[in-house]
Amino acid sequence: MRLIAAIVQDRDADELLNALMESGFRATKIQTTGGFLRGSSNLILIGVEPGNVDQALDVIRGNCETRTQLVHPNDAPYLANAIEVSVGGAIVFVWALERYERL
């Protein structure tokens, strides 16, 4: 088994979960907070067979779009001026699991 952990923005999480379920994957969502922008995000955990990793990654790619956002010093006091940053998409980790059980 493989464990896929995808960190996604709030606005992409529900659509991603629905798409994963429609594709036959089970997933768990955990609410998280980002470091740089301090924005709300989600950790999506998905257990998959090794042969289905690419299919799950395709579902993630198709439902987590990258976009730009203007960040003002009021939102991030460590910034002197407003800057445009890229947000969204997904940060994905894939681990081989020694053991996986559904109890």
Image: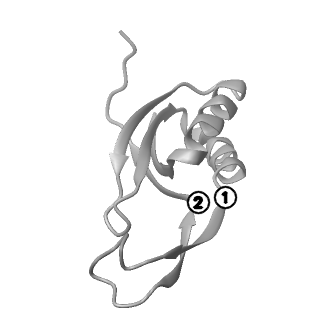
Give the number of the disc on residue 89.
2
Q: Which amino acid does label 2 sit on?
A: Gly
The picture places residue 67, in percent across and down from the top left corner, at 64, 67
The answer to whether residue 2 is above or below residue 89 is above
Please name whichever residue, 51 or 86, is drawn nearer the observer in this view of the structure.
Answer: 86
Residue most toward the top?
Answer: 103
Give the number of the disc on residue 5.
none
Query: Colour mode?
Result: one colour
Crowding around mark 1 (Cα neighbors within 10 Å: few <14, some 14 to 19, many 20+) is some
Q: What residue type is labelled 1?
A: Glu
Please name whichever residue, 58 or 15, is drawn nearer the observer in this view of the structure.
Answer: 15
Residue most toward the front?
Answer: 74
Helix, strand, or loop for circle 1? loop
Residue most toward the bottom?
Answer: 80
Give the number of the disc on residue 65.
1
Residue occupying the point 60% across, 46% down: 12
The picture places residue 64, in percent across and down from the top left corner, at 63, 52
Residue occupying the point 41% across, 50% down: 40
Please name whichever residue, 33 or 45, is drawn nearer the observer in this view of the structure.
Answer: 33
The picture places residue 72, in percent across and down from the top left corner, at 44, 77
Helix, strand, or loop for circle 2? loop
Task: Check if mark 2's residue and mark 1's residue have beta carbons within 8 Å.
Answer: yes
Q: Distance between the residues labelled 2 and 1?
A: 5 Å
The picture places residue 32, in percent across and down from the top left corner, at 34, 46
Quarter occupied by residue 99: top left
Mark sitting earlier along the chain (2/1)? 1
Residue occupying the point 37% across, 25% down: 100
Position of the C terminus by quadrant: top left
